[in-house]
């Protein structure tokens, strides 16, 4: 329950942070909701920690250029309660509101969560469904990737040593036809499966759909096949359209949910998520 | 390294190791043993305190992260000698038995009521789901939060 | 001496009074063991086995010992004179492995303590643990109790290759005849899974050895400070009178702190070695790995009956997962299951055979209910299964087999004497509250709509107020001292060691009523062997039923003595004590409590045959256990798609005898139900095939959160116990015991249209989903 010792710096600017991280040796600390428990259990033992929590230029939420731009250290609580997020991409607000518990939402950050790439984290499902972009930077400059390219594998992202997430953005005008449906692992509160859905519809018929899935496999993914199958469906056709959501996946399995159960729960909750999204569209 | 924290309204400067957890800083350095430690995975919530007005689990934060910030612990809640309405309600409604989770539970309930002054039973249960209690079955805690809400709204 | 009118004050017993212990707890002012800071105190951290079974091929502490800030490192070879960890229970033929306080050449379960590092702060001590080099020779391990005794499993203890810790047999009546006459026999394997008690405060010890006096003070989060003192003195070779145990404020126990642990002796040993105070606080992971677990049963039940529902007899083969060692009461716990086997029913033919199975797991021992939840779960499931088999309503079969009101005191098939009861009363009240017929109609409609709705009833009985001394390993009496100061203030010292149950309030209520004084004049003290007379402790729902009774008798004695002083001061033989004063029945003159008490200390004059001072200690031996009972009803609905069990309504009608403080009783009941519900739906300690604890943290072991516990509607019937003068029975474990069978009966009832007869706990969504799948296939 006690971390190994480390050197700590808390830069006040992004430039300073990137220069401290440049060597690739230091570990960036955002909200600490994943990193600190791992350090306490000595599953992580960085020699240097660079705290991003005191860099004002990383903490913002703004609507600009047709996108909602969220600084990496915006907390889940900020995202869940931001009027900008709630009006422009309500799916993201709804997802943020279901992460962990109130204390975790007060400290945990969107950048930290996405960079950690926990296969049971909530955000990736919504970010995939929303077509998010991740801007990362190092001392040499910055680049922007799609969330799909950013998430590489379980606990693995496209971040190079010395790079951190600076911003996550999603298209504005996400619309109200959305829902995040999560089946909780009862002990940890993480997602056994989490399904994020954004649809547009007209006259009760789905015109477009985007579906992000977390918890089911080693990394969150977009269910392209299901999205295509949903187009043109009304409520009655949802179950059939989402039936293929787990086809061919290498599903996670643990004491809380076997692979077979996870797959079936992905189908069930995808159906419920789409139905709820359609009802709000 | 040197940190300065405003603890329950009083400024305190200490020299700490970066790895010192905020909960250990509060308990060992500052002698504030109200917040407790019930796990190391940030699930039980017994260590909940407020940092700059936000309820956090002080076992999942290093003391150095609190440098320059305002920290409020259970000890600071009735500093003027009058119990906070949430404390009073926990007492009246028998919302505690062994009392170990109580300081964290009260801090989480306080945060809940600040953000949602008139919560439903369901909202109360969600508002405290970062805090485990093994004694009460939560029912009297729900009653206490409701009672505090009506007192604070009155 | 004033002449005043005596005003009759309203009794406090029976009132919903808010607790007197709470002000310190809600302000963060209470002192739990980790809050104790002694001058010059060191901190200890423990290296533990990462393997279920292994030989220690090499152990090198040199790097740890050389680490700056580390003052000492001790291993098994340093502590050979200390211990062993005691087993207080005895059974014929019981095999008791020597349980040293640190491993010697071999480890027997994950978490087995191997070495202790002592350092100037807890961070350095923890660092030191990582600097101990161990070479492990990993051995095969076994974690499943049935596999352990199947004949081909690795031996947990090489000296007993069959892994059998004991056999225990109990039989009454003529079981073979009963089964021969039976028109119907129902058989079922029922498990009660291993549970982790999870007191929110982990264990912790501060040991302080006063080198000048050669006296040890041990602060420990324990439910049994006096028993711990006796046993720790024996383990450490200290005179008991130079050993003091203090149980400070405690963050829950639930049986897990009704024990004597290796670490308690180890810290005493360390403090004596280094001559400085030392603190050890268990981490949650250590708590899950090394503090006792509960339950761990595999039960094979058979019930014999007539077609009209008359139960004729019951057989049980019980396999108890012991773990690697016996802790204080480990082997005794399943024998309590056997005692409770007949439940509330009058049949007299039983046969039970218990096999204790060693496994490479942490020992099992008393956890809330301790043996009775397993038994109640068994009988209440079997009665429901029998009812289903013969097409009888679960209410009707219970009413038919209950011990009748006129049969009390009732001698059970297992040799108990049930004190008092009216078993139909809480059931009928519960049925009325839930509108049972209306619910059944709703269920019929739900089934027509294809919904899976269940109504589950459990009518539980349990054993409380442990207990008569001959039935308890270390004495079943309790003690109380009432001390009145010269100024008339009253101190109550209870030998029970309440730790959240509220006796600082309820004992003050009893005292206030008996002495006719305000609550504020009473102070209740517990938990310090240097202050409080020898006592047994708080467990087995005994605090009020035994400790409260001891207090009651002490109060009668002190009142009698006050009256003698009153008579002397009033110069009258005709006096009575009431309302905090003595009154002369002829003149109406009064003397106050303070005047009488003051006179007893000044002792200028003494009443005939009366000593000075106003202090009475009573040790009370209960003549019997008490037997609370009740009816719990759970209404559930199952999500056909996910298997999730939703509790729609939960009712509890309990008969716990007289009630001292209904507010506190409600709290005990709610908490008990939440723990029973945890077992029914969520909790399970899972060991894998290598005896690794997979649920080693709160991340994986699902202690119910606020969102996972339903609203509990509750009520009472009151059948006073004749066993003690308060008429109380005990409430600490009732909720837990009543809950799990109500839940399983409800879920099975919901699944009955699919042909389901039984579901084992925990009834996780996936488990139910699998049942739905196979039933629909």
Image (tube, coloured by chain):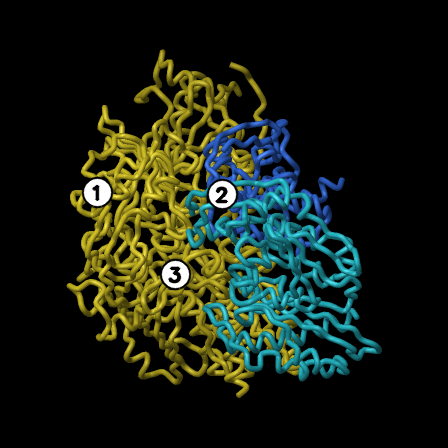
Chain colours: A cyan, B blue, C yellow
Dot 3 and dot 1 residues touching (CB under 8 Å) = no
User: Tag 3's secondary structure?
Assistant: helix
Q: Residue at x 62, y 76 (%)?
A: A268
For the C terminus of chain A, which image quadrant?
bottom right
* Residue C773, horizontal then vertical, whole percent: 53, 82
Cα gap from disc 1 to disc 2, whole angstroms: 30 Å
Q: Say which chain tag 3 marks.
A: C
User: In the rendered image, which residue does mark 2 sit on?
Assistant: B100
* Residue C541, horizontal then vertical, whole percent: 41, 50
Q: Say which chain tag 1 marks.
A: C
The answer to whether A23 appears left or right of B124 in the picture is left
User: In the rendered image, which residue does mark 3 sit on?
Assistant: C372
The answer to whether C466 appears left or right of B90 in the picture is left
Judge by depth and name the residue closer to the eye, C753 or B76: B76
Do marks 3 and 2 both belong to one polypeptide chain? no
User: Tag 2's secondary structure?
Assistant: loop
Of labels 3 and 1, earlier in sequence is 1
Q: Looking at the image, is C698 positioned above or below residue C686?
A: above
User: Tag 1's secondary structure?
Assistant: helix
Residue at the far right: name it: A203
User: In the rendered image, which residue does mark 1 sit on?
Assistant: C235
Q: Residue at x 41, y 81 (%)?
A: C306
* Residue C24, horizontal then vertical, whole percent: 52, 34
Q: Is residue C727 visible?
A: no
* Residue C709, horizontal then vertical, whole percent: 57, 59
Query: Could you say which quadrant of the image residue C353 lies in?
Result: bottom left
């Amino acid at each position: 329950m006690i971390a190994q010792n480390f050197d700590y710096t808390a830069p006040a600017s992004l430039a300073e942070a990137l220069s401290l991280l440049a060597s690739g040796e230091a570990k960036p600390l955002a909200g600490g909701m994943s990193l600190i428990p791992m350090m306490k259990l000595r599953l992580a033992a960085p020699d240097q920690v660079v705290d991003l929590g005191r860099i004002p230029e990383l903490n913002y939420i703004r609507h600009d250029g047709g996108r909602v731009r969220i600084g990496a250290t915006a907390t889940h609580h900020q995202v869940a309660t931001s009027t900008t997020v709630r009006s422009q991409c309500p799916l993201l607000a709804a997802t943020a509101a279901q992460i962990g518990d109130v204390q975790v939402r007060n400290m945990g950050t969107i950048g930290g969560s996405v960079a950690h790439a926990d296969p049971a984290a909530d955000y990736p499902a919504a970010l995939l469904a929303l077509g998010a972009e991740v801007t990362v930077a190092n001392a040499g400059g910055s680049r922007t990737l799609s969330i799909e390219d950013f998430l590489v594998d379980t606990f693995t992202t496209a971040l190079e040593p010395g790079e951190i997430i600076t911003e996550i953005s999603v298209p504005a005008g996400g619309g109200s036809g959305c829902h995040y449906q999560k089946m909780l692992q009862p002990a940890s509160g993480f997602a056994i499966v989490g399904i994020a859905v954004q649809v547009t519809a007209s006259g009760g018929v789905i015109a477009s759909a985007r579906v992000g899935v977390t918890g089911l496999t080693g990394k969150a993914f977009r269910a392209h096949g299901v999205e295509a199958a949903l187009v043109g469906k009304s409520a009655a056709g949802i179950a059939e359209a989402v039936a293929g959501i787990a086809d061919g996946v290498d599903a996670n399995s643990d004491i809380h949910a076997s692979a077979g159960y996870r797959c079936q729960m992905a189908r069930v909750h995808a159906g419920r998520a789409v139905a709820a999204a359609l009802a709000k569209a | 390294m040197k940190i300065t924290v405003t603890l329950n309204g009083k400024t305190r400067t200490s020299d700490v190791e970066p790895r010192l957890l905020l909960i250990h800083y509060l308990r060992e350095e500052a002698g504030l043993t109200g917040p407790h430690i019930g796990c190391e995975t940030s699930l039980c919530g017994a260590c909940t305190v407020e940092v700059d007005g936000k309820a956090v689990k002080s076992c999942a934060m290093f003391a150095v992260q609190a440098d320059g910030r305002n920290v409020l612990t259970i000890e600071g809640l009735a500093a003027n000698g009058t119990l906070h309405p949430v404390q009073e309600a926990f007492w009246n409604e028998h919302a505690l038995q062994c009392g170990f989770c109580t300081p964290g539970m009260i801090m989480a309930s306080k945060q809940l009521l600040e953000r949602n002054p008139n919560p439903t039973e369901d909202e109360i249960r969600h508002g405290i789901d970062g805090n485990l209690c093994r004694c009460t079955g939560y029912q009297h805690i729900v009653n206490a939060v409701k009672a505090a809400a009506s007192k604070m709204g009155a | 001496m004033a002449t005043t009118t005596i005003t009759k004050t309203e009794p406090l017993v029976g009132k919903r009074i808010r607790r007197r212990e709470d002000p310190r707890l809600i302000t963060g002012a209470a002192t739990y063991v980790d809050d104790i800071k002694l001058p010059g105190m060191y901190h200890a951290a423990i290296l533990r086995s990462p393997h279920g079974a292994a030989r220690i091929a090499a152990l090198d502490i040199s790097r740890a010992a050389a680490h700056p800030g580390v003052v000492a490192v001790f291993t098994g070879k340093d502590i050979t004179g200390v211990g062993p960890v005691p087993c207080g229970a005895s059974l014929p033929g019981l095999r008791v492995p020597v349980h040293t306080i640190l491993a010697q050449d071999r480890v027997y379960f994950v978490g087995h303590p191997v070495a202790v590092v002592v350092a100037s702060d807890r961070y350095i001590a923890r660092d030191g643990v990582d600097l101990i080099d161990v070479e492990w020779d990993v051995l095969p391990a076994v974690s499943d109790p049935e596999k352990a005794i199947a004949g081909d499993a690795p031996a947990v203890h090489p000296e007993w290759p069959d892994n059998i810790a004991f056999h225990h047999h109990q039989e009454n009546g003529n079981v073979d005849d009963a089964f021969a006459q039976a028109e119907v026999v129902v058989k079922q394997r029922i498990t009660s899974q291993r549970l982790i008690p999870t007191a929110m405060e982990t264990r912790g010890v501060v040991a302080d050895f006063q080198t000048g006096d050669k006296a040890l003070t041990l602060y420990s989060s324990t439910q049994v400070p006096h028993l711990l003192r006796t046993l720790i003195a024996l383990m450490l070779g200290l005179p008991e009178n130079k050993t003091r145990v203090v149980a400070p404020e405690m963050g829950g126990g639930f049986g897990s702190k009704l024990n004597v642990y290796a670490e308690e002796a180890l810290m005493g040993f360390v403090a004596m070695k280094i001559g400085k105070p030392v603190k050890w606080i268990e981490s949650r992971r250590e708590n899950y790995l090394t503090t006792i677990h509960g339950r761990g049963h595999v039960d094979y039940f058979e019930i014999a009956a007539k077609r009209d529902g008359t139960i004729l007899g019951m057989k049980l083969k019980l396999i108890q997962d012991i773990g690697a060692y016996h802790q204080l009461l480990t082997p005794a716990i399943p024998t309590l299951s056997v005692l409770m086997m007949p439940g509330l029913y009058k049949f007299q033919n039983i046969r039970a055979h218990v096999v204790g199975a060693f496994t490479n797991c942490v020992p099992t021992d008393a956890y809330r209910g301790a043996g009775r939840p397993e038994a109640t779960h068994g009988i209440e499931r079997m009665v429901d299964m029998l009812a289903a088999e013969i097409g009888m309503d679960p209410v009707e079969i219970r009413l038919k087999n209950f011990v009748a009101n006129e049969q009390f005191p009732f001698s059970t098939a297992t040799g108990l004497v049930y004190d008092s009861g009216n078993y139909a009363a809480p059931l009928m009240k519960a049925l009325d509250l839930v509108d049972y017929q209306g619910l059944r109609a709703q269920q019929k409609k739900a089934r027509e709509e294809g919904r899976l709705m269940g109504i589950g009833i459990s009518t539980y009985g349990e054993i409380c107020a442990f207990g008569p001394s001959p039935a308890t390993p270390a004495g079943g009496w309790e003690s109380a001292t009432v001390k009145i100061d010269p100024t008339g203030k009253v101190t109550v010292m209870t030998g029970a060691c309440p730790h959240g149950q509220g006796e600082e309030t309820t004992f003050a209520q009893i005292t206030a009523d008996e002495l006719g004084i305000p609550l504020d004049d009473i102070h209740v003290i517990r938990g310090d062997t240097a202050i409080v007379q020898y006592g047994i402790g708080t467990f087995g729902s005994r605090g009020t039923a035994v400790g409260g009774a001891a207090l009651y008798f002490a109060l009668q004695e002190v009142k009698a003595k006050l009256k003698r002083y009153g008579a002397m001061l009033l110069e009258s033989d005709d006096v009575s004590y009431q309302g905090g004063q003595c009154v002369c029945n002829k003149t109406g003159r009064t003397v106050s409590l303070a005047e009488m008490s003051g006179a007893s200390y000044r002792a200028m004059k003494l009443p005939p045959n009366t000593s000075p001072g106003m202090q009475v200690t009573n040790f009370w031996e209960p003549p019997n256990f008490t037997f609370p009972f009740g009816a719990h009803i759970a209404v559930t609905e199952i999500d056909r798609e996910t298997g999730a069990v939703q509790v729609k309504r939960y009712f509890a009608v309990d008969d716990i005898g007289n009630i001292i403080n209904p507010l506190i009783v409600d709290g005990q009941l709610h908490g008990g139900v939440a723990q029973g519900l945890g077992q029914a739906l969520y909790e399970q300690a899972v060991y894998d095939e290598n005896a690794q604890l997979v649920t080693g943290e709160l991340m994986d072991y699902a202690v119910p959160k606020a969102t996972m516990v339903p609203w509990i509607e509750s009520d009472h019937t009151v059948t006073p116990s004749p066993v003690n003068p308060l008429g109380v029975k005990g409430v600490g474990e009732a909720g837990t015991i009543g809950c799990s069978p109500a839940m399983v009966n409800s879920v099975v009832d919901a699944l009955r249209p699919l042909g389901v007869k039984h579901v084992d706990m925990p009834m996780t969504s996936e488990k139910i989903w699998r049942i739905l799948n196979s039933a629909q296939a």
